[in-house]
Amino acid sequence: MIRSRGQSVLYAVLLMPTFILVFALAVDMTSLQMQKLRLRYAVDLATVAAATAVDERYYSQTGRLRLDPALATATTRDFLMRNLTGMPGIPEPAQVAATADVSIINQTPAADPYTRAYLDRPAVCARIRVPYRFLLLGWIGLRVVDVTVAANAEIRT
């Protein structure tokens, strides 16, 4: 009869770190996807709000819709800051909003400079980069990744 005393302890010692790593990976990837989804909603809402910044003077003179670049950019940044405030993992919403890439496209047809989507109306295009800090994978050295989210909104009539 072969003695296998302590063999299960050896399996536990060898497999437990692997199970912990897989669990940490699953938790952090889920958190990362949730953060990316929240950021997507924030950028979408900001661009939709900014797409209402119509250049009224140009419209009254020509009868065609066009965005006011200064107002649309300011509206995008303001709504970004509002939507990011209180979001977990975003310590400086004002800084993220201030460094967001915002493009106002009035000459159409055109392509979104960030996603290359086809634009057939004047549009607001925005992209933000936010550092995401992993909670559990920091134990193995993977601490921070940049999450980049882009969105656009066109004027609808």
Image (cartoon, grey):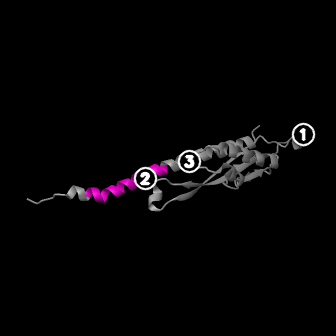
Residue 58 lies in what quarter of the image? top right
Residue 45 lies in what quarter of the image? top right
Q: Position of residue 133 (x, y in %)?
A: 54, 55
Q: Position of residue 44 (x, y in %)?
A: 66, 44
Q: Earlier in the sequence, mark 2 or mark 3?
A: 2
Q: Decide: few, some or many residues near mark 3? Use Cα within 10 Å; few <14, some 14-19, many ≥20.
A: some
Most foreground residue, 87 or 37 = 87
- Residue numbers of the magenta segment: 11-29
The answer to if 23 sits in the magenta stretch is yes
The answer to if 155 sits in the magenta stretch is no
Most foreground residue, 72 or 156 = 72
Q: Can you name the residue that lies furthest to the top here?
A: 157
Gap between marks 2 and 3 measured at Cα: 16 Å
Residue drawn at x 53%, y 48% as measured from the top left: 33
User: In the drawing, what numbered circle is on residue 24?
Assistant: 2
Q: Give the residue type that dot 3 points to.
A: Gln
Q: Position of residue 88 (x, y in %)?
A: 57, 46
Q: Which residue matches tag 3?
A: 35
Residue drawn at x 71%, y 41% as measured from the top left: 48
Gap between marks 1 and 2 measured at Cα: 58 Å
